[in-house]
Every structure is written in structure tokens, then in C-alpha cells.
Image: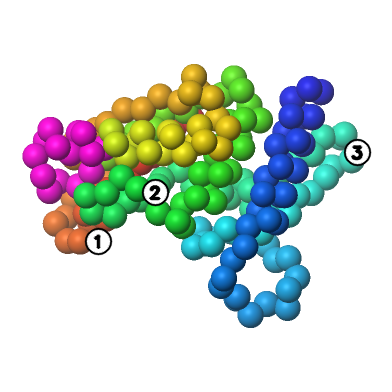
Amino acid sequence: MAKSKLIQAAAITFAVFLAGCATTEDTGSSGEATSTTGTGTTDEELTLDTDTTEGEQSVTSEFQALLDQTIVYFDFDKSEIRTEFRTVLNAHAMNLVANPNMSIVLEGHADERGTREYNLALGERRAQAVADYLMLKGAAASQIDTVSYGEERPVALGSTEADYAENRRVEIVY
């Protein structure tokens, strides 16, 4: 019961946070809240469904879709979190806050350009940037471990810019 109250409080806090976020981009909708599951480049509005027969609040499919996104991509030679991934990271932070016994590993990666040592350090900076963001949003440091694989575990083996972009990432592993 205490866990459901914590999840309910976290979900309400998240909804209030998103409602308070101002966006400058108008999608041309009629102003009604819509359900979206895309990655989005702005903070998307989420709605919460309440299952009163069970007495617990369940998160919507949109929130679950955000949690299902476990990769954060980075620009070349950068460790700053791109704006379009903040909503995803906010959802992961809420999930960690609502589940204090849960832990994650943040795996930092880089493309093959640069020395092995430099790419290991860059992967670590990227993983740490995500960890810092999650802790800023309320996750406990004890819930987060970071590791860097540098260029050692590419998902794309080509040498095009698109391949490099896929390899510049942090993977969130529960």
C-alpha cells in the first residue's frame, strides 16, 4: 500500500511538472490533451489513468512508452544531454524515485573516432551526465552505477555519420 501511495505521489508530481512546462511549439491541435508515444522534441503532455477498483494508480501507456526508451543519444564529442531526451529521463527519474529499491546501470558509449582512452573517458562523461540529471530529478546516487565501454561495443559497424551517431549513446539498463 505504501508503494502505491508513493507511485501515486510521484505520478501526480510528474503530471504537475509537465503541466507547468511551457512550450513554444504549437502542433496545431485543438488544445485537447492527446496521447502520444513519440520521442518528442518538447515535453509532451501525459495523462494518468486511475484504476479505482484496485485502489492503485496505474501509469499510462505513454509513461510506459517513455520508460521503454532506454537509449540517450549524444552529439559528436559532447556529453551534454540533448533537449529531446529530457522527457524520457524525467520518466526514468520518476520511476527510480517511486521505486527506491530499484537500481540501474548507465552504460556510456562513443563512436570509433578518437583514441581508445579518450573514448572511454567520453563514455564515462556521458554516463555521468545522465546520472547527474537523474539525481537532479530526485533519484538516489545509490540507485545508479555508471560504466564506460568507449568505442568497444558499437551497435552500428559502418563508418558513416549515421553509424557514428548510433554509437554515441548511453544505455539505461535496469
97 shown above or below 28? above
What's the residue type where badge 2 is placed? Ile
Between circles 1 and 2, the one closer to the viewer is 2
The residue identified by callout 3 is 53
Q: Residue at coordinates 50% horizontally, 58% vertically from top-left? A: 39
Q: Residue at x 73, y 65 (%)?
A: 33
Q: Is residue 153 or residue 43 the one in the foreground?
A: 43
* Residue 59 in view (yes/no): yes
Query: Can you give x and y, in whole percent of width and height, for residue 53 in the image?
Result: 90, 38
Report how many numbered discs are placed on residues in the image.
3
In the image shown, does 139 or 167 lie closer to the viewer? 139
Which of marks 2 and 1 precedes in the sequence?
A: 2
Q: Secondary structure at mark 1?
A: helix
Position of residue 73 relative to residue 162, above or below, is above
Q: Which residues are magenta?
A: 110-123
Residue 81 disc label: 2
How many residues crowd mark 2 within 10 Å: few (<14), some (14–19), many (20+)? Answer: some
